[in-house]
Image (tube, rainbow, N blue to C red):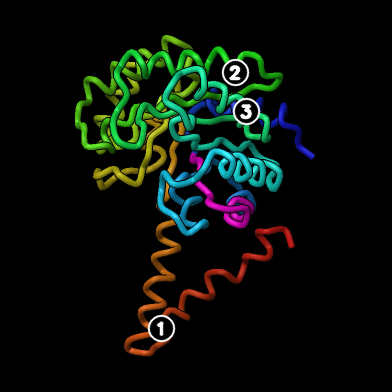
Amino acid sequence: MTTQLEKGMAFKALHEQEGAFVIPNPWDVGSAKLFEGLGFKALATTSSGFAFTLGRVDGQVTFEEKLAHCRALAEATSIPVSADLENGFADDPETAASNIAQAALTGIVGGSIEDYDGSQIYDFNQAVDRVQATVEALRSLEVPFSLTARAENLIRGRFDLDDTVQRLQAFEKVGADVLYAPGLKTLDEVRLVATAVSKPINVLVTLMTDSEVTVDALAAAGAKRISIGGSLAKASYGLAIEGGKEMLNPGQFQWRKWVGMGNDIGKLLGK
């Protein structure tokens, strides 16, 4: 069995190697084991995908439910798991920091903190204080934990790339391990962010508009880690929606053509 210490060290090493790596976002234990079976080296949870499994939308999961989800995925897999910990489930720096440190006790070896409270972006200084407090809280852990600091501007209707970069630079200065601005659209924007900071950056690939986006192209632009957010979870639910509609009207079952794609599920689950 891989220990949390070994997972933490492996996760750190992924961010130090040459090139970029893809970190897919499972939404439950089954999808986590599938991704591990396919050969990915690390996983990251998706807050929206997990919420769907509970019949809710993003932002409606409790902290206790998040902890249980993190524990389940960490225990079910032998590779590092990082978690989308939203805003740390608190506005004030100390409580958010304490919550993220508590999440580390579930077996995950990384996690993110956002500068968004569900309705608005935090004031610059408050956002930085929250990251700094979390960095300090994580120092007490006995295992390596990679903290990702997220600047949410670009996906929250605040299209201010200058402010986004300034926030990432400030997050780096107070000790964040990975920097993340979801919503970058082009390789040029990735390059701009990557050259503005020295820590590894995570790029959400599913919102990018460049037609030639590949792992190699993103790596050349300066990305270190590439994630997909809740996109595959949405695609899976989308297929279920379309199949359901088809069965109701016109009463057909054309969706069956996709069933064969799941013939390797048992093998990937290790069964």
Q: Can you see residue 221?
A: no
Q: Nearer the viewer, mark 2 or mark 3?
A: 3
Q: What is the quadrant of residue 201 in the picture?
A: top left
Q: Which residue is mark 2?
A: 138
Q: Which residue is identified by label 1?
A: 254
Callout 2, which amino acid? Leu
Q: Residue 102 bears which disc, if any?
A: 3
Mark 1 or mark 3: whose residue is earlier in sequence: 3
**Residue found 49% across the figure and 37% down from its top:** 84
> At x 62% / y 57%, what residue is drawn?
30
Residue 77 is drawn in which quadrant?
top right
Work out how far the residue at label 1 is from the one at label 2, CA to CA, in angstroms.
51 Å
Residue 94: percent from the left, percent from the top? 51, 17
Cα–Cα span, label 1 and label 3: 47 Å
At 30% from the left and 16% from the top, the residue drawn is 124
Q: Which quadrant holds the N terminus?
A: top right
Percent across and percent down for residue 106 are: 67, 35
Q: Residue 226: image x %, image y %? A: 43, 38
Find the magenta span and give its range.
22-34
Amino acid found under the numbered disc labelled 1:
Gln
